Amino acid sequence: MTDTTRFSFRLSALIVLQLWFLSVSASPANRVWIVRRDVENLDEATTEFHQPKEQKVENALPRIYFMEIVSDIRLRYASTKVTSKVANPADKAQEATFHVVLPETAFISSFLMEIDGKVYKASVKEKEEAQTEYQNAVDAGLSAAQVTANARDANQFTVSVNVEPQAKMLFNLTYEELLTRRRGIYEQVIHVSPGSIVPQMSIRVNIFETLPINKITVPQLRGNDIEQSQDLSENEVAKIIRTNETVVSVVYEPTETQQIQSSKDGLQGQFVVQYDVDRSSIERKGGEIHVVDGYFVHFFAPSTLPALPKHVIFVLDTSGSMAGTRIEQTKQAMNSILDQLREDDLFSVVEFSTSVAEWDLRKPYKGLEPYYYNVQLEETTEVSQNTTQLEESFGLYDDIFAYPVTERSIKRAKEFVKTMDVTSSTNINDALLLALKNSQSVQSRLRLTPIIIFLTDGEPTSGVVDKTEILANVRKGNSDDVVSIFSLAFGTGTDYDFLTKISSQNRGFARKIYEAADATLQLKGFFEEVASPLLNNVRFVYNKDGPVHDVTETNVPNFFKGTEFVVAGRIDPDSKLSASISGTGANGSFLFPDIRPLINDYSVLPIPNNSVAETVPAKKSFSLEKIWAYMTIQDMLKKRQIVDDAKSIAAFNSKALNLSLTYGFVTPLTSLVVVKPNSTAATADVRPADGIQPSNGIAYGAPSPIAAYSPNHFSGGIHPFAVSALGISVPYKRPQTTTFVPQLGTTISPIITEHFEFPSFSPVEWISQFEHNVTHVKIPAGNETLDLSWEDELPDIEYDSCTTNRLHHAVCKSIWKCSTVLHESTFVSKELTVDAKAACVIENKYVGVCCDVTNFPELPIDFTTILPELETTTSVDDTSTFTSDP
């Protein structure tokens, strides 16, 4: 037999073996539970419910035939339950997918599945314990699923399960959150994306308040962008039903025809309910306090106070990565924001790339030098007093680059905005220190509320680049703790945790600005939130530090119009609660000396069982305990961002963890685990899928057993597009007579490609398929687009591991240092498909590729003996497992 003939025979045997494995793994007895986060697309199994009449039952896909979402909002605390029922009309087992998008601030509190009439409920465990329990279940041959909240982006929940032929199953997920008041309204956003037309589809939002609900609107279904040009027209399908002035329900039940009008794939977007309450009865009473069963919640949202004059310093990133759409959207937003400044405000602008500079409106605009390092901060606010150099004067503080809001100054600033251009790197350290120095110069002459709005799309790459050092420098520069820094992270190239820490340590907060067509609206909307400070240095005191316990944050650096501050705590059963609020307002000191609870141990109307139009049954008590627990966990997670010492961080983590476990919340410190007893053959080993790198540094996609699948993986745990860790254990039923018996734990690659040569990788050709400029390329990532540097600046080294095919070994490398990219190939195809899925991110800045460095070993088995033996299979006397290791 020639070598060519021998190879062809081996290859044929291998393909047959591959197909046999696929047929075994598809057995109804082998339920595969896969949990994924940040998935890009739902499985095709969630398409339209009705099959064409000519389609055979055996080819019919699983269908969602019922979906109900019920959200109960009591005192702004929303508990939302999503129920989905799926049917598999086919004569074979198939995979069904349950997918929910969660608000970023929500905690999952319950998840269950009903299969074959049996209910399997998840439990919340500490991360390490959850991983151990999950692994034990897998090792014992049980089906298992594990869901872990991702602290960075905890808004996707997907579970896929094999459904028996002609069977049905039910998914049920509950998540909870405290609604945030912004720009004068509470907004409950429910993401609806079933992926198909659903015959029975309903959403119900029940709102229970103690103050009158004075306005409620239901806008048209929004797209999935965070902020977009909103259609202000009302949703004609939704019904608003008022039970009384404090109880309102919204019912949305679109027919199949109405769903098709939204999209051929069904509803896709956000169902939004907006409302607010009438506070006129408590405006002079210091807010709204409720006490029930030893817990209290205090809502404070004054609306009639005059706004404080402010000094706003805009710190704008004009580094090279802002080129194109980002800088244009920033310009558009700045033009609108400048018009929102009030007459009693002052404003300054610091522009930064490699160098930093304050805008001098008296002179023609001068862009930043491309490569100018080590700016001397002490000299930046000094201006020559030679008045002949000055074009005109704008106000009393021109010499320190702070300008009044006048028609002339705003016009000149807009001219500067129009002229802005991008260049060089990102010097965050010097930009923030210069802005703080500018603020101090103004504060030395005039008392205004100082606010820094810091916009960047990248990480520090010039000047001081050590983030710990930058944090220390900024805190030192703001040592009097007067200035609030609000960080805006533009796009996905930023280190959001770093920006969050900057703001949390300096009286502010961070916000993501998503790179989309509506980014300008996002920037404008954010400024509206902080445009009108009403109070500074607000302090809440309860019982003069008496018998109250575990109170959440009581100090507010700045209180803005249209927002609400909420405090929760515990009080001894026999104690009476009183509170006081102090601060500084536009007219001087501000004080509410003796605030009493609005209602003690009250009852709240429950939800009608069937229809909101029915008679309301008897009242039942409502507990504030869950609100307190939720707020305390959020408070601990925020406080750990502020401190630097390990002991304090551990203490905050410990308290948050204990509460998460006690109240069953899935938080960044806990995981949700569900295990289904199974006495049949071993099933797929499903590992955590939270987008966090496992200990071996490799994150995998979620393929069907054995079949190759190409996820989108980005190295370093930076930003996985679609990440699910999966180790595969394939059930192998051993025949009575065969000479091929894989032993337990045998490692084998079911597809061998070492005999084929694929085209070499060309960085220039690869880049050409994406939008790019001289230095940056835009890589599509699901619903996002990453703007990454593609310059040849990286050494020829291996970064983190990454893979799109379990049969290969790949590492993330510079696109200029890789000759063979890990491609998508099926069996023996020579086609080279190198698209965005082959990309990975290096150092949060550069685009890399999954570089194939596979070194296949020699085959340990003579496959020429396999085919004849497979044909002799008679019956099964045992079940073994072999593992395809990562």
Image (cartoon, grey):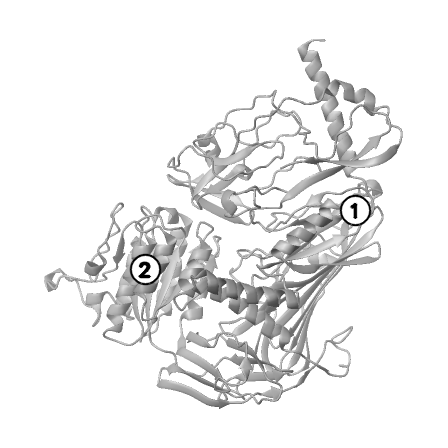
- Seen at 40% across and 65% down, the residue is 505
- Seen at 61% across and 38% down, the residue is 710
Give the x, y percent position of residue 21.
Answer: 76, 33
* Number of the label disc, if any, that sits on residue 473: 2
Q: Quadrant of the C terminus?
A: top right
Residue closer to the observer: 600 or 416: 600
- Identify the mark nearer the N-term, 2 or 1: 1
Q: Farthest residue in the right direction?
A: 874
Residue closer to the observer: 549 or 89: 549
Tell me if 883 is positioned left or right of 452 in this view: right
Going by the numbered disc 1, the residue's amino acid type is Gln
Q: Quadrant of the N terminus?
A: top right
Going by the numbered disc 2, the residue's amino acid type is Asn
Distance between the alpha carbons at the discs numbered 2 and 1: 64 Å
- Seen at 42% across and 45% down, the residue is 845
Find disc 1 in the rendering and name its residue. Answer: 51
Give the x, y percent position of residue 199.
Answer: 77, 57
